[in-house]
Image: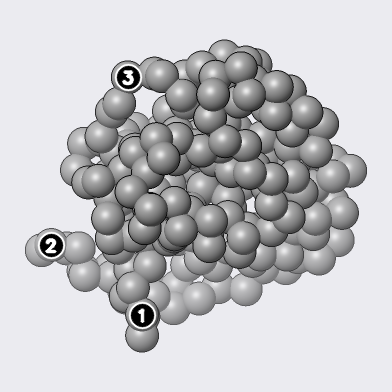
Amino acid sequence: MQSVVICNVHSGSAATGSESLTSLAARAGCRFLPVKSNGEVRRASRDFAAQGGSRLIVAGGDGAISHAIQGIAPHFAALELGIIPLGTGNVFARSLGMVDFDIQAAFECALSGPVRSVDLIRTSNGHSAFFSNAASGGFGGEVTARVSPESKRRWGSFAYWMTPRGRFPDPKPYRVKLQLDDVTIDQAVFGLAIANGRYVGGGFEIAPYAKVDDGKLDVIVIPEL
């Protein structure tokens, strides 16, 4: 088993793109596997890694990519990951420069494009997890958590901007203490982002100087005003 396309058909524009992907995968001679949730993406990715596959292609949004990464962990060196951005925000794809790719161009890149290394961040809070783009907390984290699938389908990436209008009229501050090498930050903040990529939410550029392959993280603190 060399490659497989796992597509979460409930992600963003994946429902309309799955037919094209089915045809593209058939012509390329690779398996197309439609699933209905990101949990299924994780399980299918884990199975593919266990069967010795070489390139896993994930079609969906940032959630699908995240679950695929959890599924193949920690066997990152043995498997290549291609992405076809069919989600709402597609923020990790934006950080990779895949902004104007149509579905065929994205498929060709994911299937046979050159391999590049990217950083992964491991978090520990009772159990280990990995992420590739960003982790956010405070106001931004609440917005992301509360954007409903219905809002995403209706507004697309604008859902991340529409949701706060009615639900967060007065964001509350949080007290945080950060130890970053030899720098300590102890203050009340509205938000915090630890970024490997440049974008969060529906495409908001939270870390304009972040690079996904420089071995570093950008830490953005939004203080209480």
Q: Amino acid at mark 1?
A: His
- Observer able to see residue 160: no
* Position of 9 relative to 126 (above/below): above
Residue drawn at point x = 31 percent, y = 43 percent: 79
Front label number (1 vs 2): 1
Q: Are marks 1 and 3 in contact (CB under 8 Å)?
A: no
Q: Earlier in the sequence, mark 2 or mark 3?
A: 3
Q: Which residue is mark 1?
A: 127
Q: Amino acid at mark 2?
A: Asp
Query: For this rendering, which residue is in front, 162 or 108?
Result: 108
Query: For this rendering, which residue is in front, 78 or 193?
Result: 78
Q: Amino acid at mark 3?
A: Pro
Residue drawn at point x = 57 percent, y = 36 percent: 31
Q: Residue furthest left?
A: 182
Q: Are marks 1 and 2 in contact (CB under 8 Å)?
A: no
Q: Which residue is mark 2?
A: 181
Report the side of 115 relative to 148 (left or right). Answer: left
Marks 1 and 3, Cα distance to the nearest angstrom? 33 Å
Element at label 2? loop
Crowding at dot 2, Cα within 10 Å, few <14 / some 14-19 / many 20+, comes out as few
Q: Which residue is mark 3?
A: 114
Crowding at dot 1, Cα within 10 Å, few <14 / some 14-19 / many 20+, comes out as few
Q: Earlier in the sequence, mark 1 or mark 3?
A: 3
* Position of 16 relative to 100 (above/below): below
Report the side of 43 relative to 215 (left or right). Answer: right
Crowding at dot 3, Cα within 10 Å, few <14 / some 14-19 / many 20+, comes out as few
Element at label 3? loop
Q: Residue 168: x and y, percent?
A: 75, 65
